[in-house]
Image (spheres, rainbow, N blue to C red):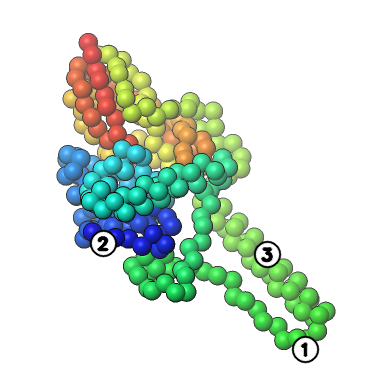
Amino acid sequence: MGEPDETAFRHWHVLFDELCNRAGYYDDATLASAYCALTASKGQRQHETALRNLNNWRSGRHLPRSGNLRVLAKLLNVADDPQTQKLWNQLYRQAGEMEGKARPGLPVPVEQYAVPSHAPMTALTRVTGRQTGMTTLFVPERLGRKRFSAMQAAFGGAVLLAVGATAGALVTASGWRPWAGPADHAPIIAFNPVVNMKVGDARPIYAERGDCGKLPRDWHLLASDLPALRTGTFSDGGLARRFSKFCQGLTPARAIVFTASAPGIEEFEIQGDFFKMTVTD
């Protein structure tokens, strides 16, 4: 693995994408197959779940949990190069701190990535080169101070109008509404990766969210992604709420109830989160 340029990488997901490319995982499907093989996840449902999670992590929409991070590091042989390992941990920690600083209910702020003028074109700059900037307006001095101010005011008003219209369209398209919804008073389901139950017990162990502020998937769609276990079965727990780092607060979700039916210990994954289930008599 070639040593990465620390000055070129400012976001964990960009480094992750670059390391995937260097390892030959140019598409997420191939990466998902390798991920499932490493985690001993079998079946089409597990592959589709891994594919969705990897796409989210690679694009920067979500940040993997520490357990997933260890799997990814092993898959990409990150520890083989000390500098890569150091940068990998540093950027992941910064991404987590950035999420924590964002105010609840607001999207995580995204820093602009500025490519230094002296930096050569690399795979990183190609990935992060999709940037936009405001065009600088040069007004000849001969137009005079009053005319320049009037043009500024007119241009500023037009920009504000356009931004307002665009923001309104985005809010409408996203489905987010400032008023009450059916999940506003639903129970809050906390995430606990270690679950201990007795045969006959039934309780929610997880909640899958939808897009921030929007209702989750219907149960029949969610159920097809759940693993088959020897120790029990899953069922619909109805609408719930859960805390989400990505959404910066509570967001609607669908509760997943586990009913313990046989003693045993199993490790499994739901939506990229690892569980250790222990069922006793």
Which of 97 and 7 lies nearest the eye of the viewer? 7
The percent coordinates of residue 121 (x first, y second) are 37, 73
Quadrant into which the C terminus falls:
top left
Looking at the image, can residue 121 be seen? yes
For the residues labelled 1 and 3, the Cα–Cα distance comes to: 27 Å
Q: Looking at this view, is 88 or 269 the one in front?
A: 88
Point out the residue furthest to the front here: 82
Marks 3 and 2: which is nearer the front?
A: 2
Q: Earlier in the sequence, mark 3 or mark 2?
A: 2
Of all residues, the one furthest to the bottom in this rendering is: 142
Instruction: Kindly report the distance in space between the C-alpha atoms of the residues bearing marks 3 and 2.
Output: 46 Å
Residue under label 3: 160
Image quarter in which the N terminus is found? bottom left
Amino acid type, callout 2 = Gly
**Do labels 3 and 2 touch, CB within 8 Å?**
no
Q: Amino acid at mark 3?
A: Leu
**Tag 1–tag 3 contact (CB < 8 Å):** no
Q: Position of residue 5 (x, y in %)?
A: 36, 62
Q: Is residue 54 left or right of residue 100?
A: left
